[in-house]
Image (cartoon, rainbow, N blue to C red):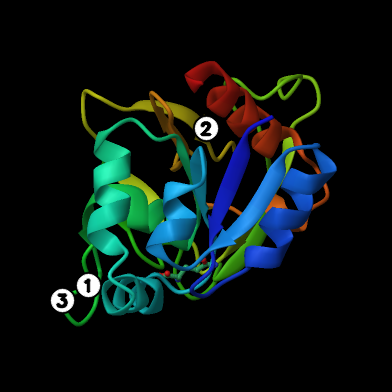
């Protein structure tokens, strides 16, 4: 049974832990190096990526997490977590850096003021039954993916409305990122996909 860490510096940590527990996997908050060393995989939650970036550096976790990512640790980032796992960022502030890992360029707060927060139904490659039973996705001041490099694959796009066609879910090997927050909707299928990625990696 894998143990999945949830980076617990800021953001909606408890929600991710709760979904992972509901799926029957071990889930623990990660705040220090020793906790990182003890997990098989890491979730980077939604929250505020500029704050999480600062805290990662203050807690001296940024390089250790980068090292684990380079060594193939599976990771899943939702919203702010997507920003943290992106190789490139547009609209970061105050010298904001990312951990990187996924060959994408994200745009922070991309959906604009009118659609700061919105909900839509998505088909996501790899998520069971999502073609017949789409994933209800909640976006909160979310990033979108502006550019996808050759190493990464698009697995989800907005289907309709003003943001139609925008890339909101990407996979690169054991790394998964989504612009939205599946941890708040009670649908465990995105986390189940990640748990499968983690199991396949062990
Ligand atoms: N706008 C936030 C950021 O830039 C992300 C919002 C979220 O995670 N809900 O980090």
**Within 10 angstroms of label 1, few (less than 14), some, or many (20 or more) residues?**
some
Q: Disc 3 vs disc 1: Cβ atoms closer than 8 Å?
A: yes
Between disc 2 and disc 1, the foreground one is 1
Q: Position of residue 54 (x, y in %)?
A: 30, 78
Quarter of the image where one finds residue 159: top right
User: In the picture provided, is 47 more to the left or to the right than 109?
Assistant: right
Q: Quadrant of residue 60?
A: bottom left
Spatial distance from mark 3 to mark 2, Cα to Cα?
29 Å
Point out residue 93 in the picture as x, y percentages from the top left corner: 23, 78
Residue under pointer 1: 96
Q: Which residue is mark 3?
A: 95
> Which residue is drawn at the image coordinates 52% and 71% (left, top)?
47
Of residues 96 and 132, the one drawn nearer to the viewer in this rendering: 96
The residue tagged 2 is 156
Which tag, 3 or 2, sits closer to the chain's start?
3
**Dot 2 lies on which element?**
strand
Q: Secondary structure at mark 1?
A: loop
Separation (CA) of disc 2 from disc 1: 26 Å
Residue 46 % position (x, y): 54, 63
Q: Dots 3 and 2: beta carbons under 8 Å?
A: no
């Amino acid at each position: 049974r894998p143990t999945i860490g949830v980076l617990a510096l800021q953001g909606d940590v408890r929600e991710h832990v709760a979904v992972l527990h509901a799926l029957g996997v071990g889930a623990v908050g990660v705040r220090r190096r020793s906790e990182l060393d003890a997990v098989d995989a890491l979730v980077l939650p939604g929250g505020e990526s500029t704050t999480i970036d600062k805290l990662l550096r203050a807690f001296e976790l940024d390089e250790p997490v980068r090292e684990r990512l380079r060594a193939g640790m599976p990771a899943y980032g939702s919203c702010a977590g997507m920003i943290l796992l992106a190789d490139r960022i547009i609209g970061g502030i105050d010298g904001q850096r990312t951990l990187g890992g996924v060959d994408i360029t994200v745009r922070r707060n991309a959906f604009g003021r009118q659609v700061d927060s919105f909900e839509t139904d998505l088909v996501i490659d790899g998520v069971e039954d999502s073609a017949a039973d789409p994933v209800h996705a909640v976006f909160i001041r979310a990033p979108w993916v502006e550019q996808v490099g050759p190493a990464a694959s698009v697995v989800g796009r907005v289907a309709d409305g003003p943001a139609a066609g925008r890339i909101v879910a990407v996979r690169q090997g054991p790394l998964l990122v989504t612009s939205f927050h599946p941890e708040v909707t009670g649908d465990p299928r995105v986390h189940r996909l990640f748990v499968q990625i983690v199991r396949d990696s062990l």
